Image (cartoon, helix red, strand yellow):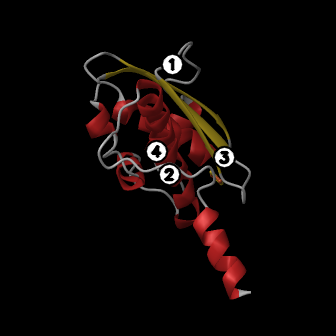
């Protein structure tokens, strides 16, 4: 069911932990499965992500997606980190089962939430960055309510 890469990042997660006084920190959750992911970013004066750490209270796929997401954004500029989509996260893991796609969305949103926090602290705007959702299923739930 899971690729070797998913199992590797789940069993041996990279960059797990937290950063004291981070440049930005973002937490996102999914109300349906109850999983929570937090990303910490250390960004230097040139806008380069020098360090990134995560804490995930969630399923194995959420741990694996957070782990690979930290590797994908480390050393990147803020603008390039923004391009790390859930699709990029899934590709880097050689795929995820369809029922686990939302776990990779959590990783994308956690990065965005941390970048948003960084931008707010610095009083800057990052092109293309939208205010993150606190719950990645907000829109779906709205739709569900309407259809009932
Ligand atoms: Fe919800 Fe994985 S099952 S994040």
Name which residue lies at 44% across and 29% down.
118
Q: Secondary structure at mark 2?
A: helix
Give the residue pinned by disc 1.
Answer: 22
Q: Earlier in the sequence, mark 3 or mark 4?
A: 4
Looking at this rendering, what residue extends furthest in the bottom direction?
147
**How far is disc 1 from disc 2 in space, using C-alphas?**
23 Å
- Counting every numbered tag in the picture gives 4
Q: Is label 3's Cβ within 8 Å of ligand 1?
A: yes
Q: Secondary structure at mark 1?
A: loop
Note whether residue 7 is visible. no
Note whether residue 16 is visible. yes
Mark number displayed over residue 59: 3
Image quadrant of residue 145? Answer: bottom right
Q: Is residue 136 above or below residue 48?
A: below
- Badge 3 vs badge 2, beta-carbon distance below 8 Å: no
Measured as percent of width and height from the top left, residue 44 is found at: 33, 16
Image quadrant of residue 68? Answer: top left
Give the residue pinned by disc 4.
Answer: 4
Q: Earlier in the sequence, mark 2 or mark 4?
A: 4
Q: Secondary structure at mark 3?
A: loop
Give the residue pinned by disc 2.
Answer: 104
Measured as percent of width and height from the top left, residue 86 is found at: 42, 53
Name which residue lies at 27% across and 30% down.
77
Q: Earlier in the sequence, mark 3 or mark 1?
A: 1
Q: Earlier in the sequence, mark 1 or mark 4?
A: 4
- Discs 2/4, front: 2
Mark number displayed over residue 43: none
The one of 119 and 143 positioned closer to us in this rendering: 119
Q: Earlier in the sequence, mark 3 or mark 2?
A: 3
């Amino acid at each position: 069911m899971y690729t070797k890469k998913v199992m590797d990042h789940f069993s041996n997660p990279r960059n797990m932990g937290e950063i004291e006084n981070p440049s930005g920190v973002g937490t996102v959750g999914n109300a349906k499965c109850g999983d929570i992911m937090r990303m910490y970013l250390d960004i230097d004066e040139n806008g380069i992500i020098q360090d990134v750490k995560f804490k995930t209270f969630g399923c194995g796929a959420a741990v694996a997606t957070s782990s690979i997401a930290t590797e994908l954004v480390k050393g990147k500029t803020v603008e390039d980190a923004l391009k790390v989509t859930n699709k990029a996260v899934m590709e880097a893991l050689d795929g995820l089962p369809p029922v686990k796609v939302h776990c990779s969305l959590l990783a994308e949103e956690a990065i965005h939430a941390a970048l948003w926090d960084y931008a707010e602290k610095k009083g800057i705007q990052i092109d293309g960055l939208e205010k993150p959702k606190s719950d990645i299923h907000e829109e779906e739930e709205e739709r569900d309510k309407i259809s009932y």
